[in-house]
Image: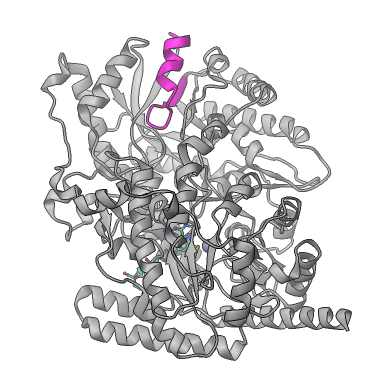
């Protein structure tokens, strides 16, 4: 049986690409040097794949920043505002990714959105009336040739035309439909060029097919591919789907002239039943996604082989593959030296998954009885904590409801805490400057003691409070200097978690996360953040927000267990966070923010599953954290990079007192929904985008606040950036916040003049 996978991590085993790109931005290295590093990474990875005898190796899954951005460039969907900067090709690419502010102009970045239900973010293509779709295959073919030179005939991978069209943002007067023919033409040309190069396969990723599709969408998909597929003769086309099943178009898809169809049997709950209902065509290859591309547990061989045996009933032409790109898992367990062997032995990262594919393929060819295969299971002892299980089992309705009702609490809180009109605040983290990272690195290496480490962290907190007071912000934060990451940090401080040293996963561009691994039942042993918040609180007369990450986000940005339900894990974490909330309150902290940045991310892709599979327990897990606090304690939450329109009622139901969220890059369209739904939670829609180094002007922010007060009751409105400032430099963050405070002052004065 042949093997393949959908895509591979590309940030580099030791994040070589991240450092090279960031050094290029800082002008420390040349374009040539950056490209050489990128090439080294590709070469090294291809060698690993070849050694692990992967039968069909993909290419063009590599990217200097993002695959969707690469496709926009490939199709010449480069908005004029970036072309007009007259930068080099590479700098135009990065201007689209991060915005540009310099001698050549001042342009915002493309919007960034969550890639389906993952913590990866793609750059949203923008289509304008003057966009002229034209094919530029330089990247795709040069990476293909590079692999040929290394002795590998690869299968180039690109996001397919249907998903591109669905995810693109239409900016002008033309309709989405009006771009269809141009995009078809470009993909037809691509097929021709691939034929000319003598390629064997090309892979079109169409994850949009796993969403709820209406007839019109299915028809559009058919229309696009009918035309594109006519062009092929020797080239084989793999239509790859992932992140779920394709129940709304499976029947149509199998009758189309694709040569291979990639199906997800891990997240695709109905994939097998679709086979049972409609079969699988004889003349096509099934690329069976049987290895979990998103989680890090070793493959359960008997279970997977049973699945393969089932699939063999429908076709003999099977290539075994991963359920999605391996972009979402770290490189290799080989880099982890500190984890105990009896924990590490249960994990399989990208490289190990390639090995599993190889083993599975051999077993699948030889096996006569799956009973002979050893089952890898985690020993239960390490995972079980009776106290935690008992606490979860005793939860009742009172644990999920807070008294008195929000409207009463809000009046009490404003008075008691002294919150001004249009209160200015930040989301929590302040720039993680080099010195912070260095001191943490020194501490982790054992070069300095815990006392020295903490002393330095306290000195950063002191500086941070001073900076905020100087800027004139109303509600302060301690800056989150003690955290490497808002989830990893909690993972490191909760019992039941395993955490790694090098298991980085790309989140966007050069930014990576190291998701902690939920290994056993979760318990908080002792307070985690109280000393930092209490210290900051004592340094100022202004209120300081306590800063926690909520249970749904901790769960969603961790690698979860597969032996208990998500709900159970969320409630275990919820109880741990509740303990922390109550300790913060007892330490005199009057405002506590419980970030649920990732709440929207894991909303099932199909609407019918939203409540039963997710929201019902996710909202309760959050409510569990704050149900026992006093009425005067103000509970904030924060969400980033999300579209909330369709779950706005549920967000209100979380019963927080205040919510801050991303809005700037998405042009504040959420305001209309907030207005229309009479949203009860006080809100701070982000007034500027923190993921770009651009400093927003006072005028720009003033206009945004003016727009906000037209739609939202000013007594319920907060002024803040989009998200935490950890990725920014200190100078640009301070300059942006100064402008934010000045803009708020202008609007406050306007309001006062109106009143008098
Ligand atoms: C808010 N977001 C988050 C998401 N997911 C999370 N798990 N966390 C988030 O905050 N998803 C959505 C959004 C956007 N996503 C991100 C993701 C990642 C970052 C980010 O800034 N990542 C940092 C890594 C942060 C970290 O853990 N840093 C370590 C330092 C590790 C390190 O590189 N050390 C160096 C030495 C220091 C140096 O010279 O730089 C080394 O070891 O060599 C720490 O602080 O200890 C990144 O850089 O990628 C932001 C938003
Ligand atoms: N409190 C966190 C939230 C990020 S989503 C921060 O400020 O970084
Ligand atoms: Zn955020």
Q: Quadrant of the N terminus?
A: top left
Say above or below: 223 vs 482. above
Residue placed most toward the observer, 390 or 281: 390
Say above or below: 388 vs 691. above
Locate residue 368 relative to residue 4 in the image: left or right. Answer: left
Q: Position of residue 340 (x, y in %)?
A: 13, 55
Say above or below: 375 vs 537. above
Q: Residue at x 44, y 53 (%)?
A: 398
Quadrant where ligand 1 appears: bottom left
Q: Which residues are magenta?
A: 260-283
Locate residue 674 relative to residue 324 in the image: left or right. Answer: right
Q: Position of residue 307 (x, y in %)?
A: 30, 21
Q: Residue at x 57, y 74 (%)?
A: 426
Q: Residue at x 73, y 57 (%)?
A: 671
Residue 525 visible within the image = yes
Q: Give the quadrant of residue 16.
A: bottom left
* Magenta stretch holds residue 266: yes
Residue 474 visible within the image = no
Q: Residue at x 19, y 50 (%)?
A: 386
* Magenta stretch holds residue 611: no
Q: Position of residue 330 (x, y in %)?
A: 32, 50
Residue placed most toward the observer, 676 or 345: 676
Q: Position of residue 308 (x, y in %)?
A: 29, 20
Q: Quadrant of the C terminus?
A: bottom right
């Amino acid at each position: 049986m042949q093997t393949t996978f959908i895509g591979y991590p590309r940030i580099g085993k030791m994040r070589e690409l991240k450092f090279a790109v960031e050094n290029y931005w800082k002008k420390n290295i040349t374009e040539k040097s950056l490209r050489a590093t990128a090439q080294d990474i590709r070469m090294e990875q291809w060698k690993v794949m070849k050694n692990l005898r992967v039968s069909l190796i993909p290419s063009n899954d590599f990217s200097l920043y993002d695959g969707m951005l690469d496709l926009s460039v490939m199709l010449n969907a480069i908005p004029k505002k970036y072309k007009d900067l007259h930068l080099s090709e590479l700098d135009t690419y990065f201007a689209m990714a991060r915005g540009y502010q310099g001698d050549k102009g001042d342009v915002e970045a493309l919007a960034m959105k969550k890639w389906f239900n993952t913590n990866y973010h793609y750059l949203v293509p923008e289509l304008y009336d003057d966009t002229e779709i034209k094919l530029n295959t330089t990247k795709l073919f040069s990476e293909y040739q590079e692999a040929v030179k290394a002795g590998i005939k690869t299968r180039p991978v690109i996001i397919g035309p249907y998903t591109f069209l669905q995810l693109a943002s239409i900016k002008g007067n033309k309709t989405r439909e009006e771009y269809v023919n141009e995009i078809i033409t470009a993909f037809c040309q691509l097929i021709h060029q691939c034929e000319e190069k003598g390629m064997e396969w090309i892979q079109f990723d169409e994850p949009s097919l796993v969403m709820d599709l209406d007839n019109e969408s299915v028809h559009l998909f058919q229309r696009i591919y009918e035309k594109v597929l006519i062009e092929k003769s020797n080239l084989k086309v793999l239509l790859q789907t992932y992140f779920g099943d394709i129940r709304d178009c499976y029947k149509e898809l199998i009758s189309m002239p694709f040569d291979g169809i990639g199906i997800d049997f891990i997240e695709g709950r109905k994939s097998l039943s679709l086979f049972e209902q409609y079969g699988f065509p004889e003349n096509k290859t099934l690329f069976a996604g049987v290895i979990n591309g998103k989680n890090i547990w070793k493959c359960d061989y008997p279970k997977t082989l049973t699945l393969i045996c089932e699939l063999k009933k429908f076709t003999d032409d099977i290539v075994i593959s991963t359920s999605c790109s391996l972009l979402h898992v770290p490189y290799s367990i080989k880099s982890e030296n500190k984890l105990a062997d009896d924990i590490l032995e249960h994990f399989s990262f990208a490289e190990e998954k390639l090995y599993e594919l190889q083993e599975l393929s051999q077993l699948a060819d030889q096996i006569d009885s799956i009973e002979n295969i050893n089952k890898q299971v985690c020993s239960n002892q390490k995972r079980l904590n009776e106290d935690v299980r008992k606490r979860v089992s005793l939860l009742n309705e009172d644990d999920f409801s807070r008294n008195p009702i929000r409207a009463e609490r809000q009046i009490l809180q404003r008075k008691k805490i002294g919150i001004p009109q249009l209160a200015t605040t930040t989301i929590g983290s302040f720039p993680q400057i080099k010195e912070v990272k260095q001191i943490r690195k020194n501490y982790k290496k054992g070069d300095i003691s815990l006392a020295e480490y903490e002393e330095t962290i306290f000195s950063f907190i002191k500086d941070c409070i001073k900076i905020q007071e100087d800027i004139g912000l109303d509600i302060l934060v301690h800056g989150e200097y003690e955290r490497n990451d808002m989830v990893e940090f909690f993972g490191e401080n909760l019992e039941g978690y395993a955490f790694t040293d090098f298991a980085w996963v790309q989140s966007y561009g050069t930014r990576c996360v190291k998701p902690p691994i939920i290994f056993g039942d979760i318990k908080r042993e002792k307070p985690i953040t109280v000393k930092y918040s209490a210290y900051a609180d004592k340094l100022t007369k202004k209120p300081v927000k306590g800063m926690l990450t909520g249970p749904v986000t901790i769960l969603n940005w961790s690698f979860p267990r597969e032996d208990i339900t998500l709900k159970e894990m969320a409630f275990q974490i919820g109880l741990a966070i509740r303990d922390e909330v109550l300790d913060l309150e007892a330490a005199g902290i009057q405002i506590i923010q419980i970030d649920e940045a990732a709440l929207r991310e894991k909303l099932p892709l199909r609407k019918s599953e939203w409540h039963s599979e997710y929201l019902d327990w996710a909202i309760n897990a959050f409510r569990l954290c704050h149900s026992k606090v006093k009425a005067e304690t103000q509970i904030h939450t924060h969400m980033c990079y999300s579209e909330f329109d369709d779950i706005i009622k549920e967000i209100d139901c979380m019963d927080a007192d205040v919510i801050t969220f991303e809005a700037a890059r998405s042009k504040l369209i959420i305001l209309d929904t907030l207005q229309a739904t009479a949203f009860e939670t006080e809100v701070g829609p982000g007034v500027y985008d923190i993921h770009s180094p651009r400093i927003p002007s006072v005028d720009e922010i003033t206009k945004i606040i003016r727009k906000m007060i037209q739609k939202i009751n000013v007594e319920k409105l907060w002024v803040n950036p989009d998200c935490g400032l950890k990725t920014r430099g200190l100078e640009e963050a301070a300059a942006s916040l100064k402008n934010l405070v000045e803009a708020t002052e202008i609007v406050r004065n306007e309001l006062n003049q109106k009143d008098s």
